[in-house]
Image (cartoon, rainbow, N blue to C red):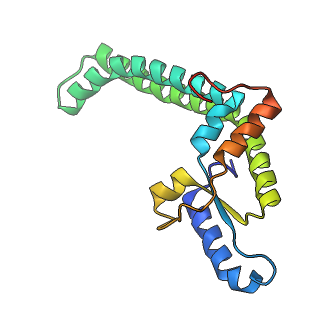
């Protein structure tokens, strides 16, 4: 996943390179930045909605497995002696939890991939049309403290991206929006 969810180190490196090169490119094109709220954008795409449904299913299934796992694990961690049957149940539950988690992670990533690719393309289009040299994921920038200050005048292209997603997918606004 390259565009929507870049690793913070990559984002920081890209920012440092952009800022270091900014003085050399100022005559050609000024640095122009925009923000996007990727969680909202992903939720607006049908594939993103499918990934969200899978995530909810995974959460429910993993909670069910954890309900079996937690009491035995707590007893084991407290130093209690488990019977052979309880140890087998604990091992099986741990393995089942890990396998289920890995399976869902793959399924969620596969389900989200079409949304991420489409959204990346739309972001790139909007950035090129508007002359943005950098588009930052607002949530990542805030959580990582990558951006210390951002003026209110920095454009947020979230709604424009969502509008284009809906135009491309024929999707309407979810209930409660508009």
Residue 103: x, y in percent?
Answer: 59, 27
In the displayed structure, does residue 9 sit left or right of residue 20? left
Q: Residue at x 74, y 26 (%)?
A: 171
Looking at the picture, does residue 10 appear above or below residue 166?
Answer: below
Residue 39: x, y in percent?
Answer: 58, 40
The residue closer to the viewer here, 61 or 121, is: 121
In the displayed structure, does residue 92 sit left or right of residue 104? left
Residue most toward the top? 85
Q: Residue at x 76, y 57 (%)?
A: 127
Q: Residue at x 63, y 57 (%)?
A: 155
Looking at the picture, does residue 74 appear above or below residue 5?
Answer: above
The residue closer to the viewer here, 114 or 44, is: 44
Residue 80: x, y in percent?
Answer: 17, 26
Looking at the picture, does residue 150 appear above or below residue 173?
Answer: below
In the displayed structure, does residue 165 sit left or right of residue 67? right
Quarter of the figure that contains the C terminus: top right
Q: Quadrant of residue 48?
A: top right
Q: Quadrant of residue 85?
A: top left
Q: How many marks?
A: 0
Residue 99: x, y in percent?
Answer: 53, 27
The residue closer to the viewer here, 42 or 10, is: 42
In the displayed structure, does residue 18 sit left or right of residue 118? left
């Amino acid at each position: 996943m390259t565009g929507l969810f870049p690793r913070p180190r990559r984002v920081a490196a890209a920012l440092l390179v952009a800022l270091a090169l900014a003085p050399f490119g100022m005559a050609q094109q000024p640095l122009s930045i925009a923000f996007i709220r990727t969680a909202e954008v992903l939720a607006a795409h049908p594939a993103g909605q499918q990934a969200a449904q899978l995530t909810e299913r995974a959460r429910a299934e993993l909670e069910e497995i954890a309900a079996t796992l937690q009491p035995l694990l707590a007893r084991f961690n407290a130093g209690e002696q488990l019977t052979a049957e309880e140890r087998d149940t604990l091992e099986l539950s741990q393995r089942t939890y890990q396998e289920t988690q890995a399976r869902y992670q793959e399924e969620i990533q596969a389900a989200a991939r079409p949304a991420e690719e489409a959204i990346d393309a739309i972001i790139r289009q909007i950035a090129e049309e508007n002359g943005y040299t950098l588009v930052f994921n607002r949530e990542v920038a805030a959580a990582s403290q990558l951006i210390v200050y951002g003026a209110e005048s920095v454009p947020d292209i979230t709604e424009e991206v969502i509008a284009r997603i809906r135009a491309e997918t024929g999707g309407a606004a979810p209930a409660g929006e508009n």
